[in-house]
Image (cartoon, helix red, strand yellow):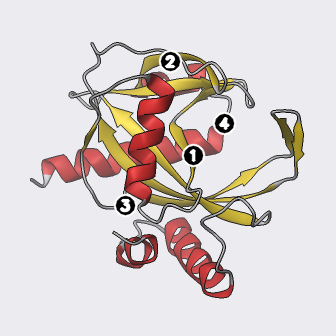
Amino acid sequence: MDYIQAIKNFEPMNEQEQNDKKLILNFIEKNDDVLYRDNEYAHMTSSGLIFNEKLDKILMVHHNIYDTWSWTGGHADGEADLLKVAIKEAKEETSIENIGVLDENTIAIDILPVVPHVKRGKFISGHLHFCISYALIADENSHIEAKLDENSGVKWIKIDELEKYSDEPYLIGVYRKIHKRVVMSKKNK
């Protein structure tokens, strides 16, 4: 699905998502390059929160730049199918071949600030990621392996132990929001 339509179809569950959806759509309307990192102010990214079958753990990677445990994801780099981006990044960053999709619809929309940092020897100024997220699923017994140029570890972490691993309180809130939405969706089926 086209990323603009996916954003328009998304049903916000709180005021934050309502505001972020509106701001992202307004920015896209005025900028035709949001699928590319060339837009140094803000650009589209896609993340996948990978759950185990019991929905009580998520697969996380230890991010090299931020030195904390985080979800998988990456830049759109011109790809308008953001679910495809989320799956590709999840596979690349964890080495799991068989990653499924819990729901093909967008599970969360967030504007995430990126602090200034150095990546591959190049200074990257602070900017915004317009993060479109999806709920993915994998067998927790699958082989996992770090993608060493991006992360130094991969492991399953219990949802109720996120604070022990992540140094990013705002993102812990995003993970919990997505988990709540996934659990609610499962109950309604």
Q: Amino acid at mark 4?
A: Glu
Numbered tag placed on residue 168 in the rendering: 4
Counting residues from the start of the chain, the first of labels 3 and 2 encountered is 3
Q: Amino acid at mark 1?
A: Gly
**Residue 72 at x, y percent in the picture:** 51, 36
Image coords of residue 12 (percent x, y):
41, 70
Numbered tag placed on residue 106 in the rendering: 3
Whole-Å distance between the Cαs marked 3 and 2? Answer: 24 Å
- Give the distance between the C-alpha atoms of the residues marked 3 and 1, in whole angstroms: 15 Å
Residue type pointed to by label 2: Val
For residue 74, the mark is 1
In the image, which disc is placed on residue 154?
2
Q: Nearer the viewer, residue 27 or 110?
A: 27
- Separation of marks 1 and 2 at Cα, in angstroms: 16 Å
Above-or-below relation of 177 to 164: below
Seen at 24% across and 51% down, the residue is 184
Mark 1–mark 4 distance (CA, rounded to whole Å): 17 Å
Q: Quick one: SS at disc 3?
A: loop
